[in-house]
Image: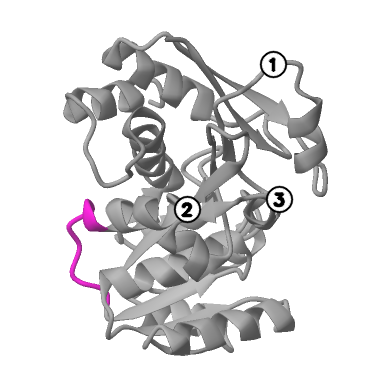
Amino acid sequence: MSKRFAVLGNPIGHSKSPAIHNAAYRVLGLDWQYGRAEVGKGGLWSFIKSLPEVWDGFSVTMPLKEEATRICKIVDEFVQQTGATNTLVRNNDGSWSGYNTDVFGIVQAVSKAKEPKPEKILIIGSGATAMSALVAARYLNPKAEVRIHARNKRTRSTLIKKGKSLGLRASRSWHLGGSIGWANLTISTLPAGALDEFAESNFERKNFKPGGMLLDVAYANWPSKLALLWQDADCFAVSGIEMLKWQAIAQIRIFFGGNPNIELPNEIAVFEAMTAVTE
């Protein structure tokens, strides 16, 4: 049976999700279609209502993740913890269920790198993806110390309070360079290029040394200047494309069987096909 899905957000033209999903569907032998549509902040519900045909589900990216949560009748535990939905599935009665697969994507991207267990985690940014990174930190190491580096005082404070409620030792990062040296895992949730100036200003500093690996969730123009800064210091940097593939695996598990915890048939081959279209 044919089904239709798409990724929604703004900007969306750079998204690799259509290539990743369609590659997976081919391996699974599914007659499904996955596209993309540009939808601005505040426009999600009106877009869905205006569709001339029934669509089965959507991937949701910036700036729509909180808005997606508000239209859901049912949400999973990660949406409850983060307030952010990145996966929408239409129910039989026409209502929507929401899932957050970003947490799973972050946990998998970090775990598969096979670096030491993170004891000190720096999260850069304070948006929806940063909240998912914070919840992921709890699963990576429930005893971790976490610092939040963000300009927005309100959302930064919200993240710190959330981290403490999760049992993490959460606090504010006062100095980005110092916190990068302190952390053995840095997760940047900022848009591509947002830290270019910081990276460029630190390339020539002989005493600049990251304390561990980097996960840069932005994957456009990889390696980013931030990732190059890590590599120049002989430290490990992971592209956000790894997070993207793993969160897509969880999405397809949901689209296919309704459960993000049940593996797909021949999932190794599915992941390999995803990797092939992103290299």
Res 215 visible: yes
Q: Name the residue rendered at 55%, 59% in the picture.
A: 129
Determine whether 153 is above or below 107 in the image: below
Secondary element at tag 2: loop
Do the residues under discs 1 and 3 have CB atoms within 8 angstroms? Answer: no
Tell which of 232 and 258 is nearer to you.
258
Q: Secondary structure at mark 1?
A: loop
Labels 2, 3: front one: 2
Callout 3 amino acid: Pro
Residue 218 numbered tag: none
Q: Amino acid at mark 1?
A: Glu
Instruction: Classify the position of the N terminus by image quarter.
Output: top left
100 vs 12, nearest the viewer: 100
Q: Quadrant of residue 77?
A: bottom left
> Image check: 126 left or right of 131?
right
Neighbor class of circle 3 (other Cα within 10 Å; few <14, some 14-19, many 20+) is: some
Can residue 189 be spotted in the picture?
no
Q: Which residue is mark 2?
A: 100
Asked if disc 1 and disc 2 are in contact, CB closer than 8 Å, the reply is no
**Residue hosting label 3:** 63
The image's mark for residue 53 is 1
Which amino acid is tagged 2? Asn
- Residue reaching furthest to the front: 93
- For the point 67% across and 33% down, the residue is 12
Residue located at (46% from left, 43% from top): 223
What residue is shown at x 61% (from left), y 50% (from top)?
A: 72
Region of the chain picked out in magenta, as a range:
111-118
* Magenta stretch encompasses residue 103: no
Q: Nearer the viewer, mark 1 or mark 2?
A: 1
